[in-house]
Amino acid sequence: MDSLYILLIFIAVSILIILFLFQSKWIIKVNYQFPEMNDLHISVFFYKWCVLREKKLRIPNQNEMEKGYMHFYKQLSRKQLHLLKQLRFRSLLKEIKVLEFKWQTKGGTGNAFTTSIASGAIWAIKGWLIGYLTQHLQLCEKPQIHVQPDFKSSSLETRFSCMISFRLGKTILGIMRVLKIKEVK
């Protein structure tokens, strides 16, 4: 009889722990600076406790990126990525809250005319990205973007900082919805 009570208590505690983890709030903080540090720094927090501090991910160089794009394009042309059309990422994105979004860019080409065109193009790309994020994610704070043209020298500097928050259970359900594939008739 005692073993039955111990088993029931163990099952109840296990269920409570699983429910707690599914309702838990996770925060991911991403920092990137170019050219000072060429690594992507990621920190993961469970509520307010730091689980992973400053994990550095190496950014691939241009040759590695081109090889990856070419492999993706070959797979796409062979129609081996047909499942991408059926995935529904919007339901997953609605579960993510953006707590902070800062992106500052400073640069120039050495020529005032081309620097102004490049600065305008960067503003357009950043504006489009902010519009996309606003439409598909929950923004808790107004995104801060800035472009500072440098008309005198040829350089590029950028700083990016982002903090997102999500609940583990809702994210798992969103991933399950994304991976759900319609029947082919």
Image (spheres, rainbow, N blue to C red):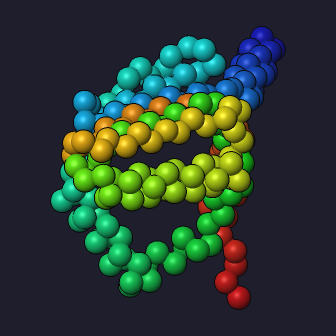
Q: Position of residue 132 (x, y in %)?
A: 63, 55
Q: Position of residue 48 (x, y in %)?
A: 60, 14
Query: Looking at the image, which is closer to me, 69 or 52?
Result: 69
Query: Looking at the image, which is closer to me, 9 or 101?
Result: 101
Left or right of 152? Residue 104 is right
The outermost residue toward the bottom is: 185
Q: Position of residue 78 (x, y in %)?
A: 38, 84
Where residue 179 sits, quadrant-wise, is bottom right
Name the residue at 39% across, 34% down.
159
Where residue 142 sits, quadrant-wise, is top right
Query: Looking at the image, which is closer to me, 120 or 21?
Result: 120
- Considering the image in quadrants, where does the N terminus appear? top right
Q: Is residue 125 visible?
A: yes
Name the residue at 77% across, 16% down.
9
Where residue 73 sits, quadrant-wise, is bottom left
Name the residue at 21% across, 56% down.
62
Figure check: 56 above or below 45: below
How many numbered marks have been drawn onto this rendered protein structure? 0
- Considering the image in quadrants, where does the C terminus appear? bottom right
Left or right of 29? Residue 56 is left
The outermost residue toward the top is: 2
Left or right of 159? Residue 48 is right
Query: Looking at the image, which is closer to me, 55 or 62?
Result: 62
Q: Is residue 167 visible?
A: no
Name the residue at 32% across, 41% down.
150
Q: Position of residue 45 (x, y in %)?
A: 54, 22
